[in-house]
Amino acid sequence: MKAILVGFGFIGRSLVKTIRLKKNTLNLIDKEFKLVGVSDLDGYLYNEKGLSLEKLASINEIPEYSPNFLMEKSSLELIEKCDADIMIETTPTNIEDGKPGLTHMEKALSKGMHVVTSNKGPLVVEFKKLVNLSKEMGVEFKYEATVAGALPIFSLVNECLQGDEILRISGILNGTANYILSKMYFEGTSFELTLKEAQERGITESDPTYDIEGIDAACKVVILANAIMKRDVRFKDVKRVGIKRITPEAVNLAKQSGYVIKLIGTIDKNLEVAPKLIPETHPLCVHGTLNVLHLETDLAKVITIIGYGAGRETVSAMVNDIISVIKKRN
Amino acid sequence: MKAILVGFGFIGRSLVKTIRLKKNTLNLIDKEFKLVGVSDLDGYLYNEKGLSLEKLASINEIPEYSPNFLMEKSSLELIEKCDADIMIETTPTNIEDGKPGLTHMEKALSKGMHVVTSNKGPLVVEFKKLVNLSKEMGVEFKYEATVAGALPIFSLVNECLQGDEILRISGILNGTANYILSKMYFEGTSFELTLKEAQERGITESDPTYDIEGIDAACKVVILANAIMKRDVRFKDVKRVGIKRITPEAVNLAKQSGYVIKLIGTIDKNLEVAPKLIPETHPLCVHGTLNVLHLETDLAKVITIIGYGAGRETVSAMVNDIISVIKKRN
């Protein structure tokens, strides 16, 4: 299979490094697997014979790879012109209109390409449309990395709990908010001070609104509800309360009774992201930047899965998606 | 596909009830799926047109189903004579020589039948032999329910972490031992008293040796090492310490420093089952009868999964195995 990578930011570059590292594993499944194109906002690079993973893994900007970099040409043109089987989309999330990822995905799926993505935006905006388009075109659409990073929630439900009906999902879906709440719990610090410290350590974005207002977690609630619970919901359907009004006094009061305040996303009849009191001995109660998803089902009753929700660990989910597509469709 | 069920104890009966409950789900994948035979120690029942799931789900002993029950005929004869595609093996675990399950599995695999099982014994004794036989015959051999019950560890590794190298596995693999240790932790009771209470509540067997000596957990360490880490190890290779020497004083001392004593199975260079101090905030620290597995990998770094390790929840894993076999081989 031939793949193109659209988006060469932190996740895109980490993925290239990992594909290089796992070249033997991938070639055991498909000895023809190669990366033939890569693009970012500035332009693209394409070689139908395959790009050098060694070289790509060593650079930070695509033009460093080759003078053949096509400046001012769009990713969309790469998708249109390329002869590839699979598009890996890692452009930044935009939850307003999903662009440019949404445009890339619609174009790739319409062309009959499989899509693997880490980009939440298009799924928050047009999940059903994208899934229907992939079905119509008979191609794979994989998005494991969009929710809870390395934690493989979609393949867990689809491959490991095939007989179970999922009745309810709850979880910690944002590592930054969890880092702040964990720190407040262990150290008794104020929200403002803890946020500042997290910003200084580079754990949160310079604008932390998406994390602390529960917006990022709500996006994941939308995707989980649509993908796992077969709902047809949008961002506006999620009731949402953030964490900035949580005081050290509230954290301490909970702690005295054996509870921890956590920002929990819930998918049942209602969709919600809000701070909740979790017993400190409950499997949902994980700390630091970890994410967790807790499934309530008819057969297994409860299954909880914990892992890193962001960072380079996310490539684990993307590589698994890529391997799944190759195994199923090669 | 036609299936036979060998073993009609608690798990076998629970599975029949679940197959009946999930009939529509199964028939969506394979409208010809039916149970054509069922056996226990006393004999078997066989009807190539299919047995009534409604009737089977309502009985406790096979002879209640029909006067056609063949007394004193062996399960082995059913396996030999039947025209079925898949054997579901749920006879009791015997870790000495694996029988009778081992004989059943060898016979079924040799005949070209797929095997789905909850029976640890044969896998502890002859894992490699059974896997090689299934490969040789080109059939599926699925054993999700043998380790940690409903917790789908093998499909998690095989389907959700396909690009990851598993570097180390640790976990709580016996619900009874975990129940006792949790109770000692929360209530400060002695081991003897807690064990007695667990026995009265029916949580442990009348002979609790396998649970409290770590024998059951060691069996699971053997299977995990062979199946996931591609080792070739036996029960005797597991270093093993049980929990009966753990005093309330030791539990309390650990608690004062934020630790909990848990019976942990570990698979890395060495294989071990032994009580360990686990920080109370670590994902491995789950309580009651829950089981947990904690994977350390090269890409995702850490993935922890928690669920019930025994009881009727185990059928979740068996149904998933059955669906996987049907989807792959029908």
Image (spheres, coloured by chain):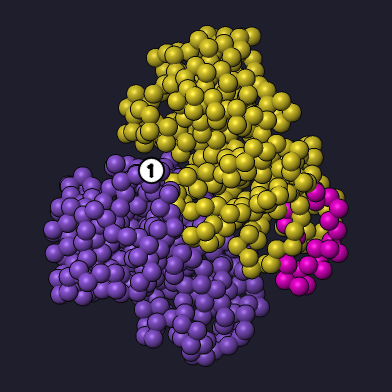
Chain colours: A purple, B yellow
Q: Of all residues shown, which one is farthest toward the front?
A: A67
At 39% from the left edge and 57% from the top edge, which residue is drawn? A19
At 45% from the left edge and 61% from the top edge, which residue is drawn? A150
Instruction: Name the amino acid, label 1.
Output: Ile
Q: Nearer the viewer, residue A26 or B11?
A: A26
Q: Residue A173's x, y, as percent?
A: 44, 68
Q: Quadrant of the C terminus of chain B?
A: top left
Q: Is residue B36 left or right of residue B145?
A: left
Q: Quadrant of residue B145?
A: top right
Q: Residue B90's x, y, as percent?
A: 59, 28
Q: Which residue is mark 1?
A: A29
Q: Residue B149's x, y, as percent?
A: 58, 42
Residue B328 colored in magenta in the image: no
Q: Nearer the viewer, residue A158 or A137?
A: A137
Residue B141 seen in this snapshot: yes
Residue B62 seen in this snapshot: no
Q: Is residue A3 left or right of residue A311?
A: left
Q: Residue A168's x, y, as percent?
A: 43, 56
Q: Identify the secondary structure beneath mark 1.
A: helix
Q: Is residue B239 left or right of residue B291?
A: right
Callout 1 crowding tier (Cα within 10 Å): few <14, some 14–19, many ≥20: few
Q: Nearer the viewer, residue B185 or A116?
A: A116
At 46% from the left edge and 82% from the top edge, which residue is drawn? A202
Tag 1 subunit: A
Q: What's the magenta region? A: B241-263
Residue B246 colored in magenta in the image: yes
At 31% from the left edge and 46% from the top edge, which residue is drawn? A32
Q: Is residue A209 above or below residue A276?
A: below
